[in-house]
């Protein structure tokens, strides 16, 4: 059994579809693993990175890359948190690349893909949709947002105040 890596900003990684569950040889440490991350923003094409090399930052360092495209970095006043997110956290699947949300001077945890239906089931649809409109400055009709749809929702939760925040893409 491989040791499971834990990611502060991406706690549900084993339930989301981010990880490739196949046998592969890590391009960083050359260990053979049964699950790996296949996405790193770097000059070199890197397709197989074991989760240990994600978590300890070795892959980001070796290939001079990062796992996350973008984040609300102006809301987080701590370089060690940015390092943890960009260099030691696997990203999520999206249309235009990640835009990781922040709250309470820290990055949020990415919970998963959502649409309005999933938000309604959680009872947080009105709250997060209103907040998204206010923060982004544009209105997205709620019926358009579907899980993994052309207009996709990404749910985040603050690690501190526990508030939910919504990102949308492709809308
Ligand atoms: Zn590795
Ligand atoms: Zn918060």
Image: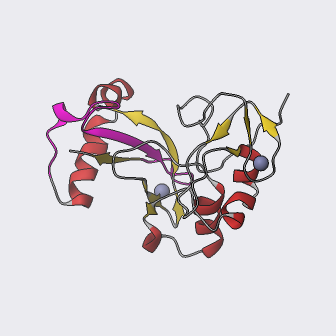
Q: Is residue 49 above or below residue 78?
A: above
Q: Is residue 122 above or below residue 45?
A: above
> Where is residue 59 drawn, in percent x and y?
70, 58
Residue 80 position by quadrant? bottom right
Q: Residue at x 77, y 35 (%)?
A: 33
Q: Is residue 136 above or below residue 10?
A: below
Q: Residue at x 18, y 60 (%)?
A: 137
Q: Residue at x 26, y 60 (%)?
A: 135
Q: Residue at x 39, y 28 (%)?
A: 122
Q: How many circles with numbers are drawn on the protein? A: 0
Pick the quarter of the image with the C terminus: top left
Pick the quarter of the image with the N terminus: top right
74 and 134: which one is in front? 74
> Where is residue 123 drawn, in percent x and y?
34, 30
Left or right, 165 with respect to 36, comes to left
Left or right, 75 with respect to 15, comes to left
Region in magenta? 139-164
């Amino acid at each position: 059994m491989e040791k499971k890596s834990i990611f502060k900003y991406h706690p549900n990684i084993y339930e989301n579809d981010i990880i490739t569950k196949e046998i592969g040889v890590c391009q960083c440490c050359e260990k053979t693993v049964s699950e790996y991350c296949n996405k790193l923003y770097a000059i070199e094409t890197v397709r197989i990175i074991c989760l240990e090399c994600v978590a300890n930052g070795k892959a980001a360092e070796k290939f001079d890359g990062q796992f996350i495209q973008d984040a609300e970095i102006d809301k987080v006043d701590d370089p060690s948190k940015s390092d943890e997110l960009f260099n030691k956290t696997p990203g999520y699947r999206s249309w235009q690349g990640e835009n990781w949300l922040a709250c309470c001077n820290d990055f949020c945890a990415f919970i998963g893909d959502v649409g309005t239906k999933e938000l309604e089931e959680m009872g947080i649809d009105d709250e997060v949709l209103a907040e998204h409109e206010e923060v982004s400055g544009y209105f997205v009709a709620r019926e358009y947002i579907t899980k993994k749809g052309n207009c996709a929702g990404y749910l985040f939760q603050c690690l501190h105040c526990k508030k939910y925040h919504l990102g949308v893409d492709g809308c």
